[in-house]
Amino acid sequence: MLLRSGRRRRQGRSKQQKLVTFRTKKSNTLPRELRSSLQALSEHSLKTTRRLDDTYYSILEKLSMLRSTIGGLQELSALTKELHESFQNDADEFQGEVEGQINVFNGFEVQQQQIEKLETRIKAGREKADALNARLEEARRHVEARERIEGEWEAKMSRMFCMRK
């Protein structure tokens, strides 16, 4: 039995030693793997955090620009509204002035009458000029006819004088 128990002890020790040796080897490699995994995870986490920070600041910058643009548009809208009101007031004032001037002229009745009188005078003058032109043309024809007759008479007389000589 002693032999058996000694063998068992040796076998037990060798099994224990093997287990301890295995655990030691495994524990030595395990922390290395864990460390490298943790380091890779840490690097990945750091890169992701940087990217998130960059994205966050980019969003903040764009948000700031958007707020600035909205503020500019609101200011432009207010100025446009003010300009429209000012233009409307000026247009109403100008319309009132023009209507007042038209009313002073009684709707341009006096001017209209003067224009009609001038048109009548121009028409009468044109008719008179046409009549004078007709008379002048008639006189011109009469003079030309006279000149022709005189020319014929002179030619006749000149032949008669030439024949007598």
Image (cartoon, helix red, strand yellow):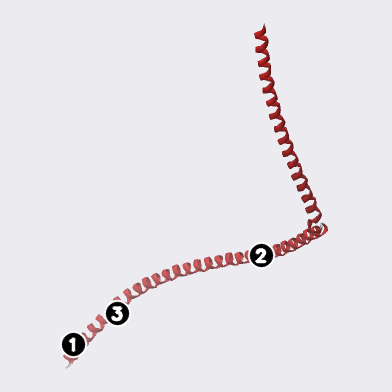
Q: Position of residue 16 (x, y in %)?
A: 25, 84
Residue closer to the observer: 4 or 31: 31
- The residue that mark 2 highlights is 75
Q: Secondary structure at mark 1?
A: helix
Looking at marks 2 and 3 on the same chain, the residue that comes earlier in the sequence is marked by 3
Image quadrant in which you'd find residue 85: bottom right
The quarter of the picture where the C terminus appears is top right
Disc number for residue 19: none
Q: Amino acid at mark 2?
A: Glu
Q: Nearer the viewer, mark 2 or mark 3?
A: 2
Question: Residue 13 vs residue 98: left or right?
Answer: left
Q: Position of residue 119 (x, y in %)?
A: 75, 47
- The residue that mark 1 highlights is 7
> How far apart are labels 2 and 3 at the CA level?
75 Å
Q: Secondary structure at mark 3?
A: helix
What residue is drawn where x is 41% and y is 69%? 44
